[in-house]
Image (cartoon, rainbow, N blue to C red):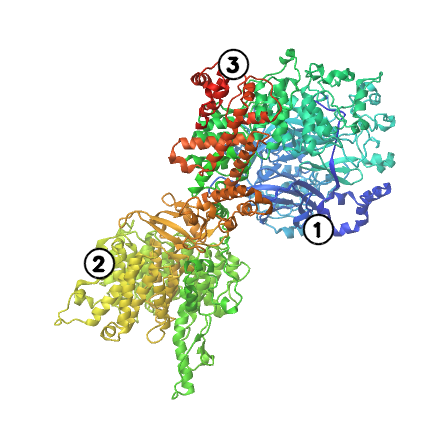
Amino acid sequence: MSEVVYEETATMIAAGELQSFVPFGRDHCRNHPNAFNLQLRELQPASELWSSDGAAGLVGSLQEVSLQERERECWQLRKGCVGVREEHVEFEEELYAAGNVVVWSQGSRTHGSNVYKAFTVDSPVQQALWCNFAVPQNKKDEEEVEQTVCIVQSSCVNVHTVTGKDFISPLPFQVLNVWATKFGLLLERKNTATDGQLCPPGEPLPTMFSMLHPLDEIAPVVCKPAGQFEGSHVQYVSDPTMKIVFSCCQPSIVVSYDTVQGTHSVWALRKVTQDERSTVLRCPPEPVGTPLGLMASGFLTSHLRNISRLDSSCGSGAPGLGPGVGTSCAVGPGSPLHYSALHSHQNRIITSSPGINSRVHSPSISNMAALSRAHSPGMAAPSFSGAARFNTSFHSPSPRGHHGLLPSPNSTINETMLMPEMEPIVPDLCIDQLWSETVTAGCHREMSSQASKVFLTSDLCESNYLCFLVESHQQLRCVKFIESNDTSQLIFASVTTIPAKDAEPLQNIDAMLVLEACGSLVLYTGITRVSKVFVPGLLSPTFSLTNHLPHLSTPMENVSTPANAGSRHLQRLDEAAMPSPVSELRGPNMKHHEASFLEDYSFHQATPYIHALRDPVCNRVTLELSSGLMLRISIPEIATSELVRKCLQAIRFILPKEAAMKVLVKWYNIYNAPGGPSAHTEWNLFVTCFMTLMGYNTERLTWTRNLHFEVPLSPVIAAKKARPSDGGSDEDWDYLLGSHYHRQMNFQPVCGPVDSSGSNTTITTDLEDPSFASSPSCPSLRLDSSAPLFPHIPALFYVLHLLYQELQLDELQRGRASSLVCLLQQLARDLQLEEYVDLYWRDYPSLISDFTESCLIDQALIGQMQRPSFLRADPPCVFSWLSSCLRGEEIPPFPYLPSICWRTRLLVLSYALYIIGDENATSTDVSKYLVKLSAGQKSYVSEPHYRRQSSVKVKFSGESLPEQLVVWLTSEGFTLKDLDSVPFGVALPIREAIYRCREQPCSDWSEEVCLLIGRQDLTKQAHKMTLAKSKASVGSGLSLEPPATTEADEEEDGMSDIIQEVTGLIWSQDLRVQEVRRLLQSSRPVRVSVVHLPEVSDHEYIEEKENKLLQLCQRTMALPVGRGLFTLFSYHPVPTEPLPVPKLNLTGRGPPRNTMVDLNSGNIDVPPNMTSWPSFHNGVAAGLKIAPASQVDSAWIAYNKPKSPELANEYAGFLMALGLNGHLTKLATLNIHDYLTKGHEMTSIGLLLGVSSAKLGTMDMSITRLLSIHIPALLPPTSTELDVPHNVQVAAVIGIGLVYQGTGHRHNAEVLLSEIGRPPGPEMEYCTDRESYSLAAGLALGMVCLGHGSNLIGMTDLNVPEQLYQYMVGGHRRAQAGANRERHKSPSYQIKEGDTINVDVTCPGATLALAMIYLKTNNRSIADWLKPPDTWFLLDFIKPEFLLLRTLARCIIMWDEILPNTEWVKSNIPQIMRGTFDPSEDINMETMAQAQDYITAGACMALGLRFAGSANSDAFDCLYEFARTFMKIMSFSGAAAVQTGYYNLQTGLSMILLAMSMVMSGTGNLKVLQLCRFFHKRTGGEMNYGFHMAHHMALGLLFLGGGRYTLSTSNSAIAALLCALYPHFPAHSTDNRYHLQALRHLAVLAAEPRLLVPVDVDSLKPCYALLEVTYKETKWYDETTVELMAPTMLPELHLLKRVKVKGPRYWELSVDLSKETQHLKSILSRDGVLYVKLRAGQLPYKDDPQGWKSLLASTVNHRSSGVRAFKPEAISTFTSEPALVSFAEFFCKTSEGMKHREDTLVLFSAMLYECVTQECPEMLPTYIAIEQAVGALCRGDLLQTFSLWQMRLVVELWDSRVLRGPANHHDALLTSEFLPVMKNMVDVALDSWLKDNSSVLRSYMRGEALSKNAQSVMLACFLVYRSIPCLRNTHTQLEGCTSVGDLLSRSSQLGIPLRDLLRLVPVLLGSAVGPQTLSGFPLQAY
């Protein structure tokens, strides 16, 4: 065949690892409990026989297992890709379907298979496949890919994603086949048999549909046919003759087969463009071949326009309608087209038909019902009234039925006709025709059948082919395709056919395995035949009779005459055995039919032969034998050693395609011959093969001959060919040489090159001449110019030289460079490239000086070689390039091979960026530093992206060079692992850049960058960030889990979840947290101690105890409010367990006998419903523990609902708490409705407040409706009056305020304004607790207009401030305006208010509304309204309480004037109260005292709000002073206390206490805690429930969230605090008259996390760290910086400029808040975890508070003593790096054997000390390497100069840093005296050598041959280190110099650094003048 480029005909390779293969799913299904299993059990004996060899067995099993049974199972394999596994194992995945079961399993060669997932579905599985759906992410255009398994049944597709989602998509039509594509599923509609002939020509139905996601509608696919004449004629794919045979994701193509013409076409699959979409949808109904635009009911009306056509659509009873079995099934022995005949289940009809108007995913009939009916044969044509869009074609009765006979579908159709037109379905995907087979009439006698296999493969030279196997012609057609230049489309080129019975691609070795008709396996790469594959254990097919199937050949040709044996690929078993003529199965075109074998050649079954291939994965494939056995084999790879692989890559890159293919195929055959070489001899084999192909005679070169002795070559190289026997020939000689005997003699020649004609030119007959080896002129050392690679030698040499340079840059590969250098030096010698040889000699002096032979290349032939332009005379050397870069010289760009020299490119550009400082080096100026080699085989249009990609986006703003370098390296995929393998000298600048970045990193770098610079703390932080973005992560993943407590009593107080690790750090000196727990626990009985006086009777004593308990219970019941704040957001619930709620325990224990005291004994009266609100609060407290980041869903909330009705109040509180932490949004609307209809008052309150809090400020409509139902004023006036409990109305009004917070919503504001003064109604409605309703309306109004001040848009006509003022001071009631006029016509019958405003009711609400509307606006005119009156007369008219509110309101309006000192507080008291009183005046002292106290309390409250959460010490001191004053007044029971009244004082004191705890919120201040504890103890007298509530709220605020939360001062937070801390507390537990108790919990809305917890990244334990916090400048203070010891509360973020972790203990880390605060906010919201990393040599603050123990502490006094004082043993306390610890362990301690090397130990210790103190442990290897290099040089045992190169680079970097001046000195990594010492040692060693051996240098410079002694090594070292170029040709210029100056002028162009040149002066001038003149030359000065 002419197209096959080059073939090795008689070679053979061995396949490895033969294993028998059974699909894992089959075994699994045997044990799977399903129906199919039972049938298999019955077949057991047969299935065991499947593997038997006997003839009877085979026939028997074939009869017993009906074909249908075998056909039901199908499976497919793919390369594993589920989950990214850490250890990179290659594993296979199998998807097996049988019956109703699908099994997805995975397993590799090392691990056995295991089931990943198994699915069982209701009806038989038609097809199972993997498919990736693209799920569009919200916001951006990026898509996430969901991996799924799709299981196709007759009526639906089940889709199961890897993440655990399941979808069921009903199918609206019967599906023939389903294909996975890049976008989703492609479905082929089953064409009923008569569609093709009977359908009216104009209107066929679409046949191809797509489903982009299981939830999307199935949409038809449109196509754009090839050919320009149709223009943009887009149409639906509706050609019934088109069958899809293949689909592929990358590239996105589909292959189809035309059943009429018998041709295959290729289509590109893509998304539809917008205009194509519109074209299709507008498409007019032309009668031509365009299908009707989808009008009316999907495709129906077009079909039904004319009922007479109905007979066209085929009935469901048509034969051959079985479920389509995909071609992937293991169909029986016949062709894959058998299935339709086998499967005609006549009753399989379409079942779930979605209703006309429903979307596809809501089937109108439940699937189950439909299925059960469909399987009863009696109902073959059911009539579904809502018949689907597509179903007419299935529901007419019979193929030839007339419409007169129409049964029930008739009705359906008439209905459908009357239906209105429906919207058409919009198409999603489009296919463009790319290529189609040409139909050739004469050539093929018959039409080709549908391709049974289609696959993509590529060859070794990266050409891509699309191959399809046409079984009818037994050929594989390969179509080559390439991407167009803009990669937008594929261009298909020529077709090549290969004779084949079967074929499979081998993806990762770029080859395919072809089963030839004769039964032998052949390996092809692309269309190039590589070799036959020998399968060990399978007999060669020669034994079987099916030796060769002729290709339409006459019997005559088959006789194997020597003349044509070469052309026929006959395979010999043995050279002697001629195949017997019987062995050929003759016949013009004999097809394979198992039957014929069984009949005619029944004895055949003895030897099974391969009859099919399947399931290729990577390089493994399954062989199906004729006996039914399956074997899995693997085809060997092209190379195992990295070096050979790289060389092959380079060769392939540079050679033209044909030549490259020749080399690769040749090499593949040699390497993989049966019994081929082992891996370690691979390189020798490669060199031999490669040089032979270049025309070398490897026998004659000594060094290559030695390679032979190492590796006995298999005889395959001297390939044997049959040829006419005319006496002896060279071939016979070859054969002898290849014989086994010869191999044992251990000497092996290699055949000469196979040239284009294929004849062998082997060893010439000079062999007998014994003198040939010695005479160099002998012709055998000449190169053979006819060798295939001979013309390309220079180009190959150059690419291998560049590869050699690349290997030099990798420590791990450098060993291989020395093997490569032998090959290179030989080529360089023969090409007479002296400078290259010199370069190699300098690199490996000891190695290269052994090689002397060179082969001759005839001058005449030199012309045949193509000398590429890029081959320069001066060799590119990457080290000298980098070195000149460091010296700052001008340098030409460095050549590199794209994608092979990855490292060269990276390092060259890194130096350009960092050393030269060219910021554009990596972007626009690449060409200045790198020159790309253009390959012979392909022009790299777009450079392929390098081997790794990374998610880092490179953005250079004003970043420094080190930062740019590090970010760029990361974006190129460079990691620390790579850095470790870069040689130490080259890596030093990169390490330096990393070191500088590590000092001052950016807080927002990505994880990869942080990893590279070695900041694990930042890496961990970045990792957490990305985690948080991807999904709401549960918890922080930190070990901040609360300890598991076992004691029962610990469990139940509800406070066990406070994280001790953190609180223990914040409050390390005392047990204040335990004390708070003790004060707030309400789940244990209280101690009731009453002294039993003798005169008290027992009965009275019991009553006394119970009364005492009742007093104590007032306190117990108030505790949960505080506990909720204390445990705020501290718990992540387990979704499978209910939330533990501690019970509220109201019993007591009386000492001394610990007797029970109970309130329910009936001895005393207990108020009814006393516990209902406390248990509500208890529920809130429990619910508030749940952190906002937890996973809570609707089901879990409902699951917590208690069984017993008495816990309903607790559950109500729990619901409110869930709203406060934002989880209530997840509660389904249905459940909300359910809870509200129960009519339980508490539940409604909790739910309404909770939902509103969760939707804070969203104006959510559905919630608004929910709330409006509960507020009569928001309902239309005529609506029925709903009986809503008063408290629920209050909650709903507040809810409106929350939902509309800050929105300034006009209508709501108007309603709320009028509701403040709502008059009492006639029938006692609105008469009780009016105050709380009015207050709620005021608060809500304040929230709606929060902070809007006077710019309330569109509300001027409402006169809001004036109206509020009137409500506040009283006056005439205005007429009700608007809708509610009707409501209030008749006055109340109970309350006589007259027509004035009842100020007592309306004042508080109005005051607070004004305060909130004008919050922080500093509006003085409004504030003046709120001034307390300045005459005694007016003072008497105001309730003292209202003075508190007014003062508070006035102060928070004048927000900026609040000052934290006592003068300011006192300034709020009116002048008349402050002066001295004239006793004659009639002053009511009581009024004055009360007014004074309340005003003070109000001012303190305002102070508390202003400085909430700031821990401002001035504010605290001021408040504390007032608290002390109040306490003093209270403790005197004198006049003042009596005048003010205990209650008023207590109220004032409570407010001051709350103000203090607001200021100190979250800090746990001890003084406040002491006050709280003092009040906790006071239970008697006037201390009622409300005061206890206030005191314990103060305690809760003080320890908010266990010290992790504090209060914010945002407007929203202030509003929440005003609601929660309203200064009128309930008198008893059922009191809601003035203020709804539930609102107390709104304080949570003001909490924000501001605790920063440093966590040590190594131990993952919280630790102390020093923070430096910088405040922005404000009008009160300049920019200030404070130091805080974290864990600490940060101030509010908007006040800060930056937060920085300070050294010296921890690595510095700065978070700049002036740019953006989001980063810090997200850290704080996730438990405030800030990862920090301890610097080496430092101890954490906990272990070493003063810093006296650290490693550096000892060195303070004098520098040098540090090293001596350093004990290596102590290292483990200073660094956590395991490498350093073990280094200290093994290299720095004196042991027995090391006594004599004391100095080395000291040196190592010093290095270790240096690394630890300088904080660069990664420099230790560099130090050691430098020391080793210098040591080796001084001892003189260096064999290669590599380490001196590195040394030179280190010195040059150091010099360039020193030259820049001392300023940059600290940047350098090697700062100690170590480097100068080492440098000096090198200088001394080299100078002393030069002194003694100047003659050696001189003879080198004259170009004389070098001796092989140690001198040559030292000489090379000298030349390398002194950077002396190759001077052989320049010596003449320098010969005649007479003086130093002359020498300098002549040598200027040589580029030798001056100090190195001066070392040469004695040598150069000495040759002329004699050494004596220069003896005094001061060498050491340089």
Residue found at the very far top of the displayed protein: 860
Q: CA distance from mark 1 to mark 2?
A: 87 Å
Q: Is residue 302 left or right of residue 579?
A: left
The amino acid on which the numbered mark 2 sits, given as a three-letter code, is Trp
Residue 63 against residue 850 in the figure, above or below: below
Q: CA distance from mark 3 to mark 1?
A: 106 Å
Q: Which residue is mark 2?
A: 1425
Classify mark 1: helix, strand or loop: loop
Q: CA distance from mark 3 to mark 2?
A: 106 Å
Q: Which residue is mark 3?
A: 1932
The numbered mark at residue 376 is: 1
Whether residue 1930 appears in this view of the structure is no
- The quadrant in which residue 1463 appears is bottom left
Sequence order check: which comes first, mark 3 or mark 2?
A: 2
Residue found at the very far left of the displayed protein: 1480
Residue found 43% across the figure and 71% down from its top: 1171
